[in-house]
Structures are given as C-alpha cells and as structure tokens.
Image: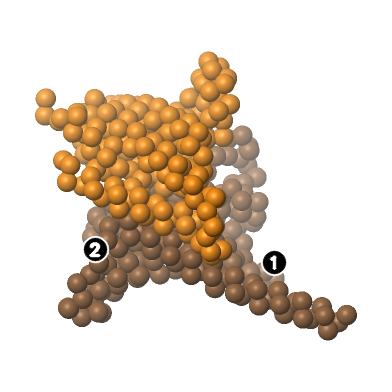
Amino acid sequence: MKENLWLILLGSILVNNFVMSKFYGTCPFLGVSKKVSTAVGMGVAVTFVMGVASLVTYFVQYYILEPFDLAYLQTIAFILVIAVLVQLVEMVINKTSPSLYKALGVYLPLITTNCAVLGVTILNITESYSLLGSVVNGVGSALGFMLAIVLFAGVRERLENSNIPACFKGYPSTLIAAGLMSIAFLGFQGLI
Amino acid sequence: MAKHEYKKIFLNGLITENPTFRLVLGMCPTLAVTTSVQNGIGMGLATTFVLVCSNLVISLIRNFVPSKVRIPAYIVVIATFVTIVQLLLEAFLPELSASLGLFIPLIVVNCIIFARAESFASKNSPLPSVVDGLGMGLGFTCSLTILSAIRELVGAGTLLGFPVLGSAYPGILLFILAPGGYLTLGLTLVAFNAVMGKIDARRRAKAAAAEGSVA
C-alpha cells in the first residue's frame, strides 16, 4: 500500500492542524470555544460529520461526477451532500439519543457552514487519497480541530476573568491568544 | 427608495457594519489569504462578485421559495456563482487561482454571504439587495487589503510585490505564517476599537453638552 495511514493521521492532527496552521473552521473555533464542555460537544459532532462526509464524497466524486464528466459541479455537489448529511445526523441523534441531541442541539446545523468540512472533502480529492486514506484524513483533521478548540476553550475560560484594557476585550484578546497558540503549533512543523 | 437611503445601505456595509472589523464574520478567508496584498484584493473582489449576484438572485426568488427549504435553495444559488468565479479565475487568472487554492470553493461557506442572504436579501427588493451586497463586499475587500498590506509589509518588506522597505530589511517571517494572521487581525481590531471608542465618547460628550445647554 502506497500511503502511510499513520502519517496522514499524525499530519492532519498536529502538523497541518486545520485551525492552527490552515485556517479552516476558524468561525466555529472563535464562536464555540467559550466553554470546555461545549467545545468538546462541537468537536465530537464535527468529527462524526467529517468522517462520514469524507466517505460519501469519495463515492460521489469517483462514481458519479467523474464517470459523467461533471467534475465542475464538485463544489455544488459536495456542499449539498454535507447539508443533507448534517440534517440526517441531526435526525438520527434526535431519535436515538435525545440527551446527546440536547447537548449538541444548536451546534449541529452550524456544521454545514463549517468550512473545515467542505475543505477536507475537496482536499481529499486534490490529494487523491484512497477511500481509507480519505476517511483517516477526515477523522484526523476533525480530531485536530477538536484538540485546538478544547485547548483554546481552556485558555479562554481563564482570559474571561482577567482584567485587560477595554479595547482588548472580546475578539482582540481572543485572536491574540489564538496567535500565540498557533506559534506553539508551529513547533510540530518538523515532525514529519 | 430615496437616494440617500441607498447611500446609507452602502456605507453600512463599508464602515458601520464592516463584516470583518465590526461583525467579525468570514474569518477563515480573512486570516488565510491575507499573506499578500494581491491575494487579499483578489479574494475580496471574488467574494464581492458572489455576494452581489447571490443577493440579487435570492431577492428575486424570495417570494417563491418556501421558508422551510430556503437554506438549501440559498446554498445552491451561492454555490453556482462560486463555481462561475472558480472557472473564470482558472481560465483568466491562473496564478491568482493557484495561490488562493482551496479558498475559492470555500467562498460557498463564507458566513458573510449567508448572513446577508438571510438577513437582507430575503427581506428586500432586488436593487437595495445589490447595493447591500456591493457595500458589504467592498467593506470586506477593504479590510482584507488593510490586513494583507500590514502582513506583507512587516513580513516581507514589500507591497504588491514591490520592495518598499529596502533590501536591508530582513522580513519577519512570522507575519506571513499562520500566527501572523491571528496577531495582525487581533491588533488591528484593538486599534479599530480604540478609535471607535474615542469617536463614540466624543459624540456622547457632544450630545450631553447639547442637552445641558437646552436645559
């Protein structure tokens, strides 16, 4: 087998961390990282959707779009697949585990507009990963997203209580903290 | 609608509700492509085109689309225009297309476009919607240009590729790398907040003084 799944996994979690070095999924990263508990919920939901989306878009690309010469419809097809998938996940979780649904409730529909999901599906195709590689890359990238968002929620919980100048309050201090954390993630650069 | 109202809608997007500095929307492309001025302007104009066209179409179909399926309908409209931009850039500006890369298809999930479709175009007639899209798009383009100018100048000592700070300037690579995106935007927001705070305080002081003289 040509691709090394471990390298893909490690690379997508640490070296090419989606939020910290690629800027995919920055909106939910800044929006949903106020509390550690909600950050974990969002991370789990995104991991699931990204794993399944990688699987489904693989079949859409190689069994529908390419045989019929429709590759230029990639963007439209993929975003629709993701929107449908998120809706489906929402319904399934609602039926099987109402408590989890309540915990994730608001964050589920938001996943459609998380550019990390659309990003990873297109990236899988441009990197021409195999079926297994795509799923590993999808899940790995999502775990990287979860790692960053959970770590950062811890930072923000502390930041909330500190006394800082008025013009730094809110987004500015959050962004600067994210910048410092991103410098830390640069340290993984030479790992692979 | 009167002329001054269009002006108000336009300026609203450009300054009062500037998507980047005031609403803090569309962060992914803002942070990712502002490594050089050329990329910043390219991304801004591509987004403006999509925003104007999608606002126009969504405002035209707003009375025919049932509200239950409006989100998927908007997604298809937006994705169509993004595909058009993607193909045009590939054909006529292949260099820009290569350096923006994955972020061109990702315009689909730019929250600004969605937010304007939902909060403006779905409630207003076509002409104001186009003006709103133009204002918001140009506001976004201006913010991207400012941020990318700072990053390119500090990071490489150039503007639009021309050397500005002389060849002795070593260039602080950090500002071109990912952390620089977060830091530049954070510090620019600090400056924006500080200036806006001063203006607000002055306005309030004036209002208070006026009230005092009336009383």
Regarding mark 1 in the picture, which secondary structure is present there? loop
Q: Is residue B205 above or below residue A61?
A: below
Q: Residues within 10 Å of mark 1 (few under 14, many from 20)?
A: few
Residue A54 point in image, percent of width and height: 33, 30
Q: Colour of chain A?
A: orange
Indicate the amino acid at tag 1: Met
Tell me which residue sits at (23%, 48%) in the image: A187
Front-lying residue, B167 or B103? B167
Q: Residue furthest left?
A: A2
Give the residue number, with chain letter if any, for mark 2. B173
State how far apart marks 2 and 1 are (Cα).
50 Å
Q: Is residue A124 left or right of residue B28?
A: left
Q: Which chain is disc 1 placed on?
A: B
Q: Which chain is disc 2 placed on?
A: B
Q: Is residue B101 left or right of residue A7?
A: right
Tell me which residue sits at (19%, 28%) in the image: A5
* Discs 2, 1: same chain: yes
Q: Colour of chain B?
A: brown
Quarter that holds the C terminus of chain A: top left
Residue A191 point in image, percent of width and height: 17, 42
Indicate the amino acid at tag 2: Leu
Quarter that holds the N terminus of chain A: top left
Residue A91 point in image, percent of width and height: 53, 22
Regarding mark 2 in the picture, which secondary structure is present there? helix
Residue A131 quadrant: top left
Give the residue number, with chain letter if any, for mark 1. B1
N-term mark: 2 or 1: 1
Mark 2 or 1, closer to the camera: 2
Q: Residues within 10 Å of mark 2 (few under 14, many from 20)?
A: some
Tell me which residue sits at (33%, 43%) in the image: A18
Q: Residue furthest bottom?
A: B213
Q: Is residue A134 above or below residue A113?
A: above
